[in-house]
Each structure stands twice: as structure tokens, then as C-alpha cells.
Amino acid sequence: MLRFRLPDLPQVRHFAETEARTAGMPEEAIGDFVIAVNEVATNAVTHGTTDGRVRLWVDAGDVVVEVHDKGEWKPGPMPGSVGGMGLWVARLLALDLNLQVGSSGSTITMRFPGES
């Protein structure tokens, strides 16, 4: 697990890349994985709260990553907006993306193909 704030996003990307390799993710999939994790982590600390946490584990050969913040999820993007596409991008790159919102904050869990 890694706790992070906005200035720590480079560390989040490094953490995601290192852990994906350790988990046996195919090299050609790591770039998309890091993009998805970065998009969701960026949302956590820009639209949620000032700090978040990211966890990563392997389940049935897939790499699962969870990003949590203590904020409340807001729908977006609005028609015609130029930003706010992070969750959409992450959803395209992941095998599965689940969003949970509650009184303790927002948690996004994503699943990616693991070992080749």
C-alpha cells in the first residue's frame, strides 16, 4: 500500500509499474496499466481529498489495484467539457472497474490481465 498526495503522483506511477512487473504483468500491458492508475489517483487527489491510498494485489492471475480517497464522487464529465475523462480512460483500459462511494469516501477497484 502507498499513501499519496498530489506531489506524490510520480511515486504512484513508479509504485504501479514496479508492482505490476513483480506481479508478472506482461511488459506490453504495463504502460496502459500505469496510465489507468495515474488517472484514477489524480482524480482522487484533485476531486476527492488531498490524500489517497493505492493498493495492489494479484487475484486469480489478474492484477487488481484499488485507489481510495475520503472525498465524495462527483459525476462527470459534462457534455462539451475538455477535462474529466480520467475515469472513462481507466474504464477503457481495465478489464473491470468498480466504483464504491460511501460515508468513508470513494474507492475505485480495477482489474487487469496479470501473468502472460
Image: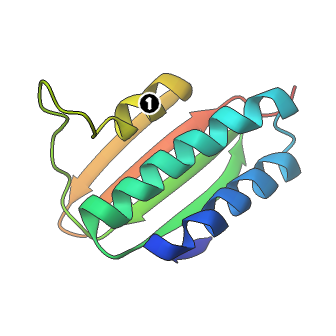
The answer to whether residue 89 is visible is yes
Q: Quadrant of the N terminus?
A: bottom right
Q: Residue at x 44, y 71 (%)?
A: 6
Q: What is the three-letter code of the residue carrying label 1?
A: Val
What coloring was used for the rendering?
rainbow
The one of 53 and 79 positioned closer to us in this rendering = 79
Q: Residue at x 44, y 49 (%)?
A: 40
- Farthest left residue in view: 79
Q: How many marks?
A: 1
Q: Position of residue 56 (x, y in %)?
A: 65, 56
Q: Quadrant of the C terminus?
A: top right
Element class at badge 1 = helix
103 is higher (above) or lower (below) than 79: below
* Residue 107 occupies quadrant: bottom left
Q: Position of residue 5 (x, y in %)?
A: 45, 76
Q: Position of residue 79 (x, y in %)?
A: 12, 24
The answer to whether residue 60 is visible is no
Q: Residue at x 46, y 46 (%)?
A: 39
102 is higher (above) or lower (below) than 108: below
Q: Residue at x 87, y 52 (%)?
A: 22
* Residue occupied by mark 1: 89
* Residue 47 occupies quadrant: bottom left
Describe residue 94's horizontal placement relative to residue 45 as left or right: right
Q: Position of residue 18 (x, y in %)?
A: 80, 56
Circle 1: is it few (<14), some (14-19), or many (20+) Cα within 10 Å? some
40 is higher (above) or lower (below) than 53: above
The one of 47 and 113 positioned closer to us in this rendering = 47
Describe residue 79's horizontal placement relative to residue 22 as left or right: left
